[in-house]
Amino acid sequence: MGGFKHENEEVNLPERLNIGVIKYFWQSSPYNPSKKNTIPHFLRNIVVFKDFSDYELYILSKFIHERTYENGEIIFKQGDLGIGFYLIYYGNVEIIVEKENPLSTSSADSMEYSLVTCLENKDYFGELALLQENSIRSATAVAKNACKLIGIFKPDLDELIRVHPVVATKLLQSVSMIIAERLYSITKEVKILKYKLSKMEQLNENEVK
């Protein structure tokens, strides 16, 4: 008669359940919590990837590239064709805007450089390149110190769409959310600037009177 064996009866486990093999696969798994330096673990700590499952982050990590930069090394220049979205694994990156000075009489000194922001660990930039065809970089990105970036490029996204459309859709949703947040932030700053400008104009009018 079938049923559960008594606890005192000997149970022979199949060899394929060898604990050593199980331990090996657990330790080598990207989901092992002791593996704190893996790309999936890093992505888990980025807010825009909060809706990804562990498996989806593991899949995404297979399409991601890593590279280290030295202090002062240019990541991309203003006017370059944008092909990638970057996240800072460690280090700092400066975003600089170049503009021509119309009052300059020397071609050597005709360009002015303005620091827009300094990004740090877990910050991201260049996301527009994944959504826009032939996207042109609107600023220059420079490593402020030794840093490591991870990035996903347009060809990687195209391949991800082909083989893992669900993960690709989530990535595009995340990138769209980043762009929406940046647009909201810019709109808010423009409103503040317009308000300050109107106040200055009122003060000038009062002084004239």
Image (cartoon, rainbow, N blue to C red):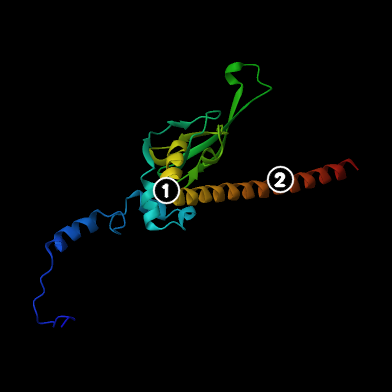
Q: Secondary structure at mark 2?
A: helix
User: Extreme front residue here?
Assistant: 1
Is residue 5 found left or right of 161 in the rendered image? left
Amino acid type, label 2:
Leu
Amino acid type, label 1:
His
Q: State which quarter of the image contains the C terminus.
A: top right
Residue 164's tag is 1
> Which picture quadrant has residue 35?
bottom left
Q: Tell me which label, 1 or 2, sits earlier in the chain.
A: 1
* Residue to which mark 2 is pinned: 193
Label 2 packing within 10 angstroms: few (<14), some (14-19), many (20+)? few
Residue 107 horizontal/vertical position (percent): 60, 16
Q: Residue at x 70, y 49 (%)?
A: 192
Label 1 packing within 10 angstroms: few (<14), some (14-19), many (20+)? some
Mark nearer the viewer, 1 or 2: 1
Q: Residue at x 9, y 80 (%)?
A: 9
Q: Secondary structure at mark 1?
A: loop
Is residue 74 found left or right of 197 in the rendered image? left
Q: Residue at x 56, y 38 (%)?
A: 132
